[in-house]
Amino acid sequence: MIWLFLAGFWMALGYAFAGVLMAITVVGFPLALPAFRMAAFSLWPFGKAIVQKPGAGTGSALVNVLWIVLAGWWIAIGHVATAFAFFVSIIGIPFGIASLKLAALSFVPYGKQVVPRSQADASAIFI
């Protein structure tokens, strides 16, 4: 519950806001639905793993550049700020580590997918 009230809800609002802004523009419209998916993931990311999507290549890299320019950098900054706030207490350290992992995902999310831990391989990032 600590995660949900102190980080998950607020970061989900950030992703949803980014999704709404993306939906307004023609260039950003393809990024809107994934932003809403990441909002749902950030509410409760535990028990899941981030893996490289099979077949992701140049297209994902180009979309990541567009995402970074339009929204990725400030959402990543939000995750990093949340992580530092969690690192203040001993109880918050695991949540801070999870927030830093989400910062990396929020900066370049395309070409990756979220799967249950049971389906993840050794190269996955576990949250």
Image (spheres, rainbow, N blue to C red):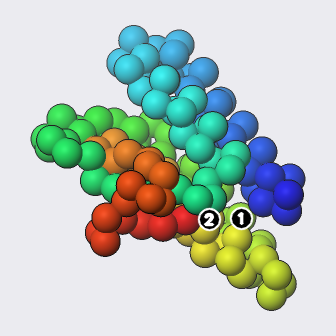
Name the residue furthest front.
118
Q: Is residue 36 above or below residue 8?
A: above
| Residue 30: quadrant of the picture | top left
Q: Whole-percent x and y of residue 21? A: 57, 23
Residue beneath the point at 51% across and 16% down: 23
Residue at 59%, 44% in the rendered image: 41
Q: Splitting the image into 4 quarters, where does residue 16 fall? A: top right
Kindly identify the amino acid type of the residue bearing the numbered disc 2.
Ser
Q: Secondary structure at mark 1?
A: helix
Please give the count of numbered marks on the rendered protein: 2
The foreground one among 67 and 104 is 104
What amino acid type should be assigned to the residue bearing mark 1? Thr
Location of residue 49 in the rendering, given as x and y in whole percent from the top left corner: 46, 58
Identify the disc placed on residue 16. Answer: none
Mark 2 vs mark 1: in front: 2
Residue in view at x 57 percent, y 29 percent: 36
Q: Which residue is mark 2?
A: 99
First in sequence: mark 2 or mark 1?
1
